[in-house]
Amino acid sequence: MSSDHVNVAIHEFGGNGRPLLLSHATGFHGYCYLPIADRLDQQFTSYALDYRGHGATPCNDDWDGDWFRYGDDALAAARRIAPDGGLIGFGHSMGATGLLMAAHREPGLFDLIIGFEPIVFPTAMPDDGGDQDGPPSMVEGARRRRPTFPSFEAAVDNYASKPPFQFVDSDMLRLYVAHGFRPSPEGVRLKCDPAHEALTFMGGAGHRLWDALPEIDTRVVVIGGGDGEGPAQIAPGIAERLPDCLFISQPDSTHFGPFVDPAGTADLIVDLTAGLTTDLTT
């Protein structure tokens, strides 16, 4: 159970080995990362959570976009999966932020967090004067997102025909639709309501985890893509502020990297966790 009496949905994907928690990006859900988990079943027992308002986890009507409540969700999931610690976390975008928030509150839970482009903006961005609203294009894009389709197949066909989904792994796209929509009188409807997604984007620039990054003692790997904007632009700065962190640049990747190349992402997780007894900074 998380804060506000939210019961966080946790999906067990099976496998053999130490526990791995997969933590999803805004607007998605845990099942999107099953193509990654399937490739890790000899190294890990994989789990994924759904943050409040996403997938199978409900959200209270009075939620105000406070990202630290997402941190509560990540912490609740981590405690249930590995109450004695030893957990590996892989977080994507907002999901990476949630894991960092959880590690800040309870450092002993995680042996390693791998964060693909966390959303942790500097307290006062140089161009925005400290504005706490999220990127206008992302907020408005979420508000305008089409919430319904006549069928699951119609949703898959629609997304597959245009960016960014036309570039993602086909299995991931089908999982996104199968577990991200529910039957409705119109056909199928998004579980993550566009208004909830917009509120999440608005809150992404307002939390102040940036100030707490130097207090996070957990080992972290921060991965940044190559487009040089938004999350990719701030990723190196996040890594610099974390006390025990390795930064990895993937110049050919975008913010959708884990969805475009789940096999490569799984290989990277294996590589990064193979040497947990060594110093990441050497």
Image (cartoon, grey):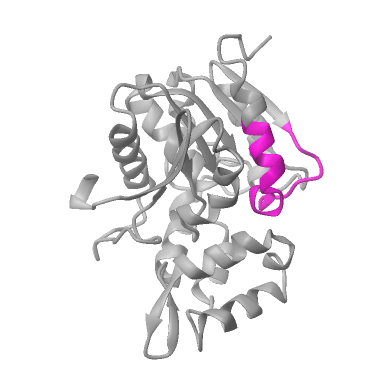
Q: Quadrant of the C terminus?
A: top right
Q: Residue at x 29, y 50 (%)?
A: 8
Q: Give the farthest residue toward the left.
A: 5
Q: Residue at x 54, y 38 (%)?
A: 41
Vertical placement of residue 67 versus 40, above or below: below
The answer to whether residue 100 is left or right of residue 257 is left
Vertical placement of residue 103 versus 24, above or below: above
Magenta-drawn stretch contains 102: no
Magenta-drawn stretch contains 252: yes
Vertical placement of residue 141 versus 59, above or below: below
Q: Residue at x 36, y 40 (%)?
A: 74
Q: Residue at x 44, y 57 (%)?
A: 200
Asked whether 204 or 193 is in front, the reply is 193
Asked whether 48 or 241 is in front, the reply is 48
Residue 60 image point, x, y percent: 24, 61
The answer to whether residue 274 is left or right of residue 250 is left
Q: Which residues are magenta?
A: 249-269
